[in-house]
Image (spheres, rainbow, N blue to C red):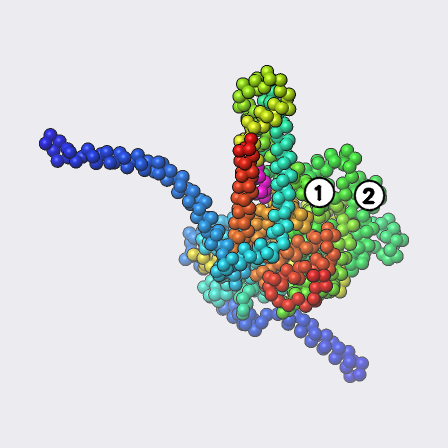
Amino acid sequence: MLLGRWGPSHLPLRKERAVIKRKYKGYLLLTPTLVLLVCLSIIPFAYALILSLRHLNLKIPRLAGQFAGLDNYRSLMRADAEFWHSMGITLLFLIVVVGIEFLLGFALALLLNRDFRGKRVLVSLAVVPMMIAPVAVGLMWRVALNYELGIVTYLIRSVGIPLKEALLGTSATALPTLMVIDIWQWTPFIFLIMLAGLHGLPKEPYEAAQVDGASKWQIFRMLTLPLLKPLIVIALLLRVIDAFKTFDQVYILTGGGPGNVTDLVCMFAYRINFKVYNLGYGASVVLVIFLMILIVTALFYTVTQKKEEIV
Amino acid sequence: MGKRKEIFLALVLVAIALAFTFSAAQAWTPEEKALLDKVKEIAAGNAGKWSLQEAGKPYKGVTLKILADSSTEADVPQKIDPEFTSATGIQVTWEQHSWDEIRSKLFMDFEAGTGIYDLVWVPFDDMASVTGKGYVQSVDKFMLNPKLLDPNINLEDYVEPLWKYTSWYGKPAKPYGFPCENPTMILWYRKDLLENPAEKENFKKIYRYDLQVPKNFEQFQNIAEFFTRKKGMQLAGKVLDHDFYGVGIEGKRHWGAVCEYMNFASTWGGPTWGGTLDENDNIVINRPENVEALEYWISLFRFAPPGVVDWYWDQKTTAFQKDIVAIALAWNDQSYELEDREKSEVAGKMGYDLIPKQKYPVSHFGSWSWTMSTKTKKPEAAWLYLQWVNSRDVALRCAKGGAMPSRKYVFDSPEMSKVPFMAATKRALEFAFPRPVHRPEWGQMGETFALYLTKAHRMEMTAQEALDKVAVEWQKLIGTKIVYPPKTQ
């Protein structure tokens, strides 16, 4: 009676509330992130999916959003030679730039993974290209590669190499030039991750290996590489996804030309969506690109995981 | 009257009849004419009774938002807008973007139906789309409202094909606005070089005729070849400290290439829709004349700077400013840049004329139209501004500030007659032809066209293959007949 009518029944209620609170606290804390995710990713994704099933072109009145079923996907996969051309050069671009960036970045990290005077300055300078916005990089290189006035063109000529046409203006040199620019900008990214990884490696296994008389190559192959593997996978994965999405430099430097030799797949998607305004077809292009990235990522992950299991 | 006189008179009458037939082909339809006559009648009735101040009173305090191109044509009116605001109490704000950006912005805004913008500049390439989709409204209802019609509207003053192709759409066609940015293509040539006695003498020795402003494309090519010189050679009595080239070309995969080539296709084979479609919208882009014209155009690349494959109009202008090119087909609105002594090494040395004629006299024109959004909440205020900013006097002031005129009154003004390239522009407009902007698919058609033109430049395809490919791709888009069966597909 001391507690009155609230006494005996109140205690279990409190407990229940505490349990409920504990049970749902996690969900409550997750809610803002989930709302953001739903608003910024899930809904646009679902909208793109719906759009891809429609004939919608903002410029052509007769294509006003009629249901198309899988027509857009069918035309894209079966009949759009330009899309497949874009996909082909994107894969080539991706393999070359990520491969070279990885080799150069890793080599640079190994080279600088020791203490010497001016190391900090050197590392800071090395990552500058990565810190510049891709649009600014595009504009900078556009000036530097100008046929009449560009510094790069001048330097190439001054070492005795005759340039008959602008580097970005010929089929033979436009794509390699874009690759060089991408390598220049993103090698520091790999370098930075690898350098951080090398710094964080434990010293004990190395000392043990040295005591056992292992050669430098053996130490690199049997110790450094396996220990850095998780970082290598992440760095390569990020670069693969990023290289697949390359757009800014292409837009600024070549617009996909000359002809369509630098028409990477994101440039193609941009043209369909924002120049031709074929939004239905454009949505199917974007979703196929998304699917491709997903497949590449999954393949990459599976291959590296399998190797890890074997190791 | 003698028999000879009779024959002469008959010939004159036939000529007049033919001329009338030609102009009638471009003239207003009876419905369009009736609308214009009605507007004229209302305007006459308003004379002496109407004022902008009175008409604007109900809309005092309203703010209009305009979406426009980043260009001189948009810069000038903004400076004189305060006069409109002080007369009506209507505020005007502008938002300007580059060509690509504005198109993306306007389509997104129109589709979303936000109604943020009251007045929008629309490239005529997109007019069929925005009118067909109902994004913008026709302005005939405002023209026919005596309360809103300025008696000095002078619609008959517009250069007819320019206004018609730019702003009249639908069936029957209705006016959706007025031209606001309307460049046309003319010939640029280095007058100082073409008139240099030593150059004239050398030219005659080689080509066996006098060096002159090219009247046909054989002469054009000869001049391009003649003036292509290496560093260290002589040009007009001076030793060149850089390579000099005969011709400037827009070779980038860009609208610039499409527009430039259409002049060649049109002068070779006829200017209907720039030599792309016939009167029934059947595809003629791969007609033999166009193939020949493309082969000719590609042949000019040997006399052009190596970087032209990356050029559109801006780079061409810069090349002239830097004194490295002798002749080109170019947009007249860029000519001011050549005459600006602070920016250009060739100011005062340039000549402007009509594009040489192979078979037909031609000049390709581009244009933008003022339009009024369907979603605007202040249509009457927007109309009053539209009418004011396009009035004769404001148009003249804009032209003095660097805008290209679309009114005959402005062309004929003493101030404009002094502008070096205005005479050529006025004459070029007599032969001006548009691209097939009446087709809403034109945006996509143009993209395909640009791609295969550059493939032909790069010798990845022959001219025939490239144009056949364009024809096939266009047929997929618009579904009309290909008049000349592709030879290479």
Q: Nearer the viewer, residue B281 or A41?
A: A41
B333 vs B294, left or right, is left
- What kind of element bears circle 1? helix
**Percent of width and height locating residue A284:** 53, 53
**Percent of width and height locating residue A4:** 11, 33
**Do tag 1 and tag 2 residues touch (Cβ < 8 Å)?**
no
Chain containing mark 1: A
Residue A245, magenta (yes or no): yes
Query: Where A23 falls versus A213 (above or below)?
Result: below
- What kind of element bears circle 2? loop
Residue depicted at x 49% and y 59% = A69
Q: Which three-letter amino acid code belongs to the residue tagged 1?
A: Thr
Residue depicted at x 85% and y 49% = B199
Q: Which residue is mark 2?
A: B230
Chain containing mark 2: B
Q: Nearer the viewer, residue B337 or B460?
A: B460
Q: Gap between marks 1 and 2, in whole Å?
A: 24 Å
- The image quadrant where one finds the N terminus of chain B is bottom right
**Percent of width and height locating residue A177:** 68, 40
Q: Quadrant of residue A94?
A: top right
- The image quadrant where one finds the C terminus of chain B is bottom right
Q: Which residue is mark 1?
A: A173
Q: Nearer the viewer, residue A46 or B442?
A: A46
Q: Quadrant of residue A104?
A: top right
Residue B470 seen in the current view: yes
Magenta-highlighted residues: A238-247
Disc 1 residue crowd, few under 14, some 14–19, many 20+, Cα 10 Å:
some
B388 vs B283, left or right, is left
Residue depicted at x 54% and y 55% = A73
Residue B427 seen in the current view: no
